[in-house]
Amino acid sequence: WVDGKIGKALSFDGVDDYVEASSISHAGFSGLTVEFWAYKSSDGVRVIPVAAGYAPWQFNIGLAGANRVSIEINIDNVYYHLSPTVVPPQITSGQWWHLVVTHNLSSGATVFYINGVAYPGTSQTGSAYGGGGTIRIGHNSSNVFFAGSVDDVRIYNYARSASQVSADYRAGAYRTTVNSSNPNQWTNGLVGYWSFDGQYTTSTAGTRDTSG
């Protein structure tokens, strides 16, 4: 563990480090939000900070162009590569970035957020997310590893609003856990949460999560 953006974070060497957590059922999802803080230790390579195992979805940095964000996602058992329709900042090394992608199944709207700023993405409608598999942080099924640190990973079962994402970015050190007494805007629809702080980790059992 290393100092993170919020408390502690996990550091990944880009060679063989990753976290594998329990799978999340996508049944009943009206959309998807993947949100986390990332600190890259190197540039110019494709990296996968967060992925859902065998590709229901995976958040990419570098696949859509040098250090650009995108998401690969299975909608109705067809795979789509969704990326911003306007040019966003490059996710460069040496600083913390708050990275979020939201997708709404019914409208098809995809929005990427970088440090609280929204960038519209490719639209794709559908009825359900396909595929399955465990959540992986720092690695995907194509054997791509992330070099750097990841903190405060959250997955929601709907597309969060711009105001909610902006509040998360501004909150900085705000802490929450699943089913806590914290304000509903942080916990409604939260189906996966990995803080990487000490209370959710052990030296013998690896990294535990609070998804469910």
Image: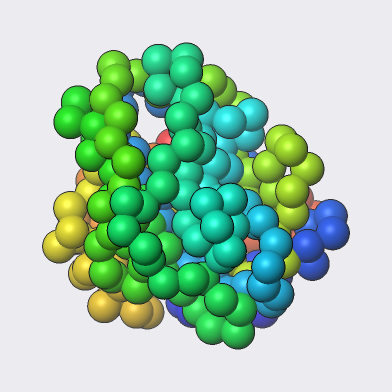
> Is 134 situated left or right of 29 in this image?
right
Q: Is residue 198 above or below residue 206?
A: below
> Is 169 situated left or right of 16 in this image?
left
Q: Quadrant of the C terminus?
A: top left
Q: Is residue 136 above or below residue 180?
A: above
Residue lying at the far right of the rendered structure = 15
> Is 160 situated left or right of 56 in this image?
left
Q: Nearer the viewer, residue 157 or 116?
A: 116
Q: Is residue 33 above or below residue 69?
A: above
Scheme of colours in the image: rainbow
Q: Residue at x 47, y 15 (%)?
A: 77
Quarter where residue 148 is shown: bottom right
Does residue 7 appear in this view? no
Q: Quadrant of the N terminus?
A: bottom right
Q: Nearer the viewer, residue 2 or 91?
A: 91
Quarter where residue 164 is shown: bottom left
Q: How many marks?
A: 0
- The percent position of residue 169, horizontal first and vertical second, equals 30, 72
- The percent position of residue 187, horizontal first and vertical second, equals 27, 51
- The percent position of residue 110, horizontal first and vertical second, equals 29, 43
Q: Nearer the viewer, residue 201 or 126?
A: 126
Does residue 120 appear in this view? yes
Q: Residue at x 54, y 83 (%)?
A: 95
Q: Is residue 128 above or below residue 156?
A: above
Quarter where residue 166 is shown: bottom left
Q: Residue at x 18, y 59 (%)?
A: 162
Q: Residue at x 70, y 62 (%)?
A: 45
Q: Nearer the viewer, residue 179 or 16?
A: 16
- The percent position of residue 27, horizontal first and vertical second, equals 37, 20
> Is 46 situated left or right of 101 in this image?
right
